């Protein structure tokens, strides 16, 4: 490596040694503002059923959205490494501001589903966003940095489910959801402003220009063995993550149906539970990141996966607000450490120049797994009983844990 490049790398690490400055601060501000409109996602599946869908179509819609993400994420990883991170993030931020507003005027489940699928174009920026985060945080502080950013950017969302639940309780599910969508559109538009004005490119160490690759390579280049020279630990890590995403895909759309249909909660009470979950996650995530950097990311991930199993089973036994709240908070308390530790460990294993495409592959693997899990969960909920998707979750988490124990290791030298 040339002296100039080494100096650039050293200076960039020094400039980015504080978590909340430069691009990290911009992402935190933008995400924090956008998360204020998060109540739309909490109640969207319930609204979808209200206007004519059913539990199986909820799962099929989530599956179709995940499959579309498979291709948008592939393109996004290609663009992030060859055209730069900033351009694709700005595009997604500006275009994503319109979809919540569209939702406010939709009264047919088929149109709502079509808009949901179209909105997945915003995921094209996910590889670039994760890459720019990893680029901007020193390796020795990576888990803490990622966890800190996630906390600051999502902390305002703890109030969102309460606001959405209050609107639904006072205006009804349909009108309340539509009003919530209008508010969400405003927050989403405002959140795009700091991205557009302040975000800086981090791919300094190579000339970013139009490569001589056709669109086919952008879509399917990940399939070439030479495109991703990955260590075996990274492959095991991604396979474990695929199982975790399948587990979450099987239950994520159905928590609200279990809580309101089996445990007897109102939508507002469920919103209160979700808000407390988000608040607790914010409190625990930074200490968890510090612990991961000290104890080891792999160890923390294994413990997190193991302890989620009894908590999800406890949730299926809940039949009151207090029981649901206790189970849901315990589930967050043990499960919140997996995601930042995973992302940091993957960054440790991935060279900077491959980070966008490797992140793309990681997210694509997750999209396919979620696409499988969502309809499986919906079918199991409708056909075999409302607790069955949560049993599927428990089994998948245990298998993911075994993969980490048997096949994954932390690198002796971390990538910068």
Image (tube, helix red, strand yellow):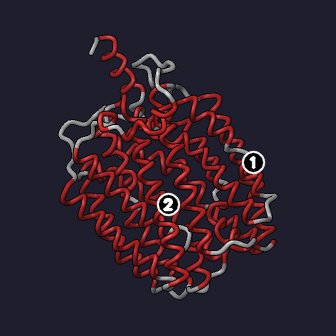
Which structural element holds mark 2? helix
Query: How many residues crowd around disc 2 within 10 Å: few (fewer than 14), some, or many (20 or more)?
Result: many
When the figure is inspected, residue 157 is found, relative to residue 387, above or below; the finding is above
Q: How many numbered marks does the figure carry?
A: 2
Q: Which residue is drawn at 78% across and 62% down?
A: 178
Q: Tell me, yes or no, whether the two marked residues, 2 and 1, touch with CB atoms within 8 Å.
A: no
Q: Quadrant of the N terminus?
A: top left
Mark 1 sits on what residue? 186
Instruction: Please tell me the numbered disc located at residue 340.
Output: none
The one of 212 and 79 positioned closer to us in this rendering:
212
The one of 253 and 411 positioned closer to us in this rendering:
253
Among numbered discs 2 and 1, the one appearing first in the sequence = 1
When the figure is inspected, residue 97 is found, relative to residue 201, above or below; the finding is below
Q: Is residue 308 left or right of residue 47?
A: left
Q: Which residue is drawn at 36% across and 62% down?
A: 243
Q: In this view, does 296 lie to the left or right of 320?
A: left
The one of 346 and 26 positioned closer to us in this rendering:
346
Measured from the top left, where is residue 36 in percent x and y?
65, 53
Mark 2 sits on what residue? 371
Measured from the top left, where is residue 216 in percent x and y?
48, 34
């Amino acid at each position: 490596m040339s002296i100039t490049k080494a100096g650039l790398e050293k200076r960039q690490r020094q400039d980015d040694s504080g978590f909340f400055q430069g691009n990290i601060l911009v992402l935190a501000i933008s995400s924090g503002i956008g998360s204020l409109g998060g109540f739309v996602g909490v109640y969207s599946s319930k609204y979808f059923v209200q206007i004519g869908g059913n539990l199986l179509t909820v799962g099929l819609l989530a599956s179709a959205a995940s499959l579309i993400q498979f291709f948008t994420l592939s393109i996004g990883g290609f663009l992030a490494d060859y055209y730069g991170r900033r351009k694709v993030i700005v595009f997604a931020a500006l275009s994503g501001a319109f979809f919540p507003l569209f939702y406010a005027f939709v009264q047919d489940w088929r149109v709502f589903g079509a808009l949901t699928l179209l909105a997945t174009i915003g995921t094209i920026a996910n590889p670039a966003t994760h890459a720019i985060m990893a680029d901007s945080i020193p390796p020795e502080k990576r888990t803490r940095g990622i966890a800190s950013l996630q906390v600051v950017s999502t902390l305002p969302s703890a109030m969102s489910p309460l606001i959405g639940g209050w609107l639904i309780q006072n205006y009804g599910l349909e009108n309340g959801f539509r009003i919530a969508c209008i508010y969400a559109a405003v927050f989403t538009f405002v959140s795009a402003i700091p991205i557009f004005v302040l975000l800086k490119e981090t791919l300094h160490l190579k000339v970013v220009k139009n490569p001589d690759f056709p669109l086919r390579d952008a879509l399917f280049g990940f399939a070439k063995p030479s495109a991703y020279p990955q260590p075996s630990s990274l492959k095991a890590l991604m396979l474990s993550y695929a199982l975790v995403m399948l587990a979450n895909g099987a239950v994520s759309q159905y928590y609200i149906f279990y809580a309101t249909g089996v445990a007897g909660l109102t939508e507002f009470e469920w919103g209160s539970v979700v808000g407390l979950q988000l608040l607790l996650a914010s409190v625990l995530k930074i200490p968890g990141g510090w612990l991961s950097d000290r104890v080891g990311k792999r160890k923390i991930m294994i413990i997190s996966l193991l302890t989620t199993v009894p908590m999800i089973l406890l949730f299926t036994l809940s039949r009151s607000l207090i029981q649901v709240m206790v189970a849901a908070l315990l589930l967050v308390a043990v499960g919140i450490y997996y995601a930042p530790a995973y992302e940091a460990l993957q960054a440790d294993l991935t060279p900077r120049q491959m980070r966008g495409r490797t992140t793309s592959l990681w997210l694509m693997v997750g999209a396919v797994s979620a696409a499988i899990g969502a309809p499986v969960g919906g079918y199991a909920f409708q056909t075999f009983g409302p607790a069955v998707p949560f049993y599927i979750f428990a089994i998948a988490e245990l298998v993911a844990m075994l993969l980490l124990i048997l096949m994954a290791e932390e690198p002796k030298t971390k990538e910068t």
